[in-house]
Image (tube, rainbow, N blue to C red):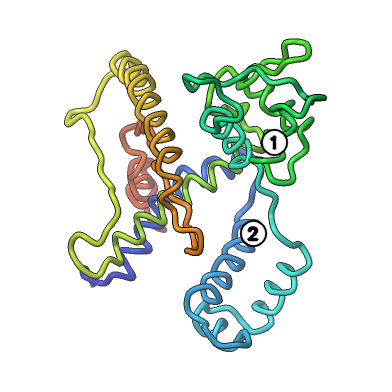
Amino acid sequence: MEDDPKKHLIDAVAVLMKPLARLLISNGVTHGDVTDVLKDVFVDSVIRHFDSSPKINRSQIAVMTGLTRKEVKRVIDRAITEGTPHRVMSRLERVLSGWHNDPTYAGPYGVPLDLPYESDKGGPSFSQLVRTYGSDMSPKATLEELKRGGSVEDMGGLVKVLRREFHPAALSLELITRLGEVAHKFLSTATHNVEKKKQGDGYFDRVVYAENGCTDDVIGRFDQYIRDKGQSFLEDLDRWFAANEPLNKKNEARKETGLYMVHYVEAPGERSSLAELLRERGVVSD
């Protein structure tokens, strides 16, 4: 049926999976690998959002996910055995943000200080910064990652910050981790806005685009324009968060929030269906 939300949701999943499938295949990830992950995610979602019973109801999970009870048990057992995935990317960003916003590590005009790796006199140091904002990350490993991403420079005794954002190397573990985190943030907002109960309940979600597309030269110009303007705007937001930090109530639970901006470029035909692709290739049914 044309108005069936389930059918439209499945079609939407097919569209959002296209660029991800290309990345997975090019890096040797198979359908079976992703199938196991999807089982984990479906079980996680039922437990997190639909099962409020004191004891996890495996029968209910099986019914809602379409998995067998044996598969549900396998997913839960594997999750308990493997533990929590290690998250690095957000911690590196928090270290850089703290360096720019915390008066302990910045000068009177908000200029980040050049920090000694360790301080014998109890003053601010890079190691202290990492312990404050990097959770359990090693200061040495953090320094190496930030140097590799071009965010800091080791000046022989002092560490100088070069920029407030972290740029991981192409196909680095940090960049792959970022893919999942960025997609999660975007899809969380999109899902919330689809499920909103009334007009005005949704979060900010806007897009601007060239009506008739652009050539590569204009796309390059646009990329540079939004890099300059976007970075300036994001730094303003970073300062806004720092200025409004005292307004957070101490005994109230906190949620992660922020703004993600991305320059997208989509080639003609990237969203076409498999049926349309097969017709273009001249494939007909036997």
Residue drawn at the location 30% of the way across and 54% of the way down: 203
Which of the two residues, 248 or 87, is positioned nearer the viewer here?
Answer: 248
Q: Taking 141 as reference, is 178 above or below it?
A: below
Residue 42 placed where, x, y %? 54, 70
The residue tagged 1 is 130
Q: How many circles with numbers are drawn on the protein?
A: 2
How dense is the environment of label 2, judged by Cα within 10 Å: few (below 14), some, or many (20 and up)? few
**Residue that lies at the very extreme toward the front in this rendered image:** 121
Residue drawn at the location 60% of the way across and 27% of the way down: 105
Q: Quadrant of the N terminus?
A: bottom left
| Label 2 SS | helix
Query: Cα distance, mark 1 to mark 2?
Result: 39 Å
Q: Is residue 126 left or right of residue 23?
A: right
Q: Quadrant of the C terminus?
A: bottom left
Residue kind at label 1, given as amino acid type: Val
The residue tagged 2 is 32
Residue 82 placed where, x, y %? 76, 62
Residue drawn at the location 74% of the way across and 74% of the way down: 77
Tell me, yes or no, whether the two marked residues, 1 and 2, touch with CB atoms within 8 Å: no
Which of the two residues, 86 or 210, is positioned nearer the viewer here?
Answer: 86
**Residue that lies at the very extreme toward the right in this rendered image:** 120
Residue 35 placed where, x, y %? 60, 62
